[in-house]
Image (tube, rainbow, N blue to C red):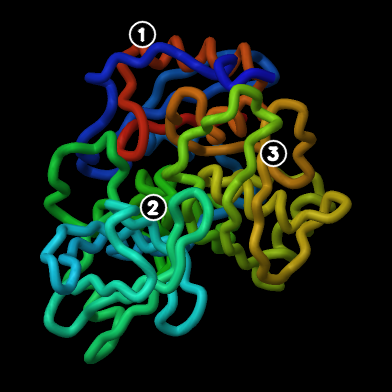
Amino acid sequence: MKTSDFDYNLPEELIAQTPIEPRDHSRLLVYDRKTEEVSHRHFYDVTDYLKKGDVLVLNETKVLPARLYGKKRGTGTDFEFLLLKRLALDVWEVIMRPGKKLKPGGIVDFGPELSAELLCKKEDGVCEVKFRHEGIFEELLDRYGNMPLPPYITERLEQKERYQTVYAKEDGSAAAPTAGLHFTPELLEKIEKMGVIIVKILLHVGLGTFRPMKEETVEQHVMHSEYYSVSAQAAETVNAAKREGRRVIAVGTTSVRTLESAARDGLVQAGSADTDIFIYPGYRFQVVDALITNFHLPKSTLIMLVSALMGREKALDVYRQAVEERYRFFSFGDAMMIL
């Protein structure tokens, strides 16, 4: 398959720059794979498509204020660090810009109490650095760090929490699992009262989110690994639903990748690991029956995952309809539910 087979035309003005308020007032495109029917609703209508016994799977990762701006010690050269993955207590994988103006041993200062030394450079522009700090690192990161908004969002985010889900818990992501941004506490409470079982898993979003596909053919692409964790209780709840023929509905592509990475012979195994699973058309889903997601970038691994679930031609057709209906796209955009 060619990467260009997953391209589509998107007017720039449809790229959402700010989140909708309230969260659940974003629009919702619903696609039924059995009937091929497309419906245009609002996100608070998601309850019309859920039923008692469904298992709704949420990714409870929390976005770190992972973008740091500093100056090279000795020269004052401006640097930007994007934290990707914690390797040890104070050792991180980062993307560093500019990448050529710091050699191993060089130091960048972010504030009086926080600096980083470059340890080594790895592949794909990734570097390994060691942070030096006075005080608690997480508190300093919160003070000096900025939310790592994608490059297509150019407007300033006034409230940091709007790039977090309301159920975010475990620090570690370099980007938000954006399908979850549409939920409010009230909507989640309503869903639970319907008899829908909410399960929380974890995948820390990393480098893959920021890396465009450069390969001409889909099969050549290699995903960057990301950490995931599934508790014994979460695994058993999902597996009970699979055994009893109840639906497992993933909120976001990160939840899909977690469930499918942990699957063995159609059942989810509890545990933690790194995954580089790449889901594209031809993939046979073991666990996920339905998906709530946002509208994704052309030629991205995420639109390929959606295409694996609903078929490439149908996915592109539905995306064309979304453009015609003036849906808002990408991280702060509207949502889509694939049944």
From the viewer's perspective, is the residue at label 1 or at label 3 nearer?
1
Front residue (pair 155, 217): 217
Which residue lies at the image location 24% right of the left edge and 37% below the top edge? 153
Q: Earlier in the sequence, mark 2 or mark 3?
A: 2
On the image, the x and y values in percent for residue 145 come to: 22, 66
**Cα distance between the residues tagged 2 and 3:** 25 Å
State the quadrant of the C terminus. top right
Q: Earlier in the sequence, mark 1 or mark 3?
A: 3
Q: Amino acid at mark 1?
A: Glu
Q: Is residue 207 above or below residue 310?
A: below
Secondary structure of the residue carrying tag 1 is helix
- Residues at circles 1 and 3 in contact by the CB criterion of under 8 Å: no
From the viewer's perspective, is the residue at label 2 or at label 1 nearer?
2
**Cα distance between the residues tagged 2 and 1:** 28 Å
Return the residue at label 3.
Answer: 289
Which residue lies at the image location 37% right of the left edge and 38% below the top edge? 44
On the image, the x and y values in percent for residue 282 come to: 77, 27
On the image, the x and y values in percent for residue 207 come to: 47, 51
Which residue of the protein is positioned furthest toward the bottom in this rendering?
135
Return the residue at label 2.
Answer: 175
Question: Can the viewer see residue 137?
Answer: yes
Q: Earlier in the sequence, mark 2 or mark 1?
A: 2
Question: Is residue 212 toward the left or the right of residue 333 in the image?
Answer: right
Which residue lies at the image location 59% right of the left edge and 15% below the top edge? 5
Return the residue at label 1.
Answer: 324
Which residue of the protein is positioned furthest toward the right in this rendering?
265
**Cα distance between the residues tagged 1 and 3:** 28 Å
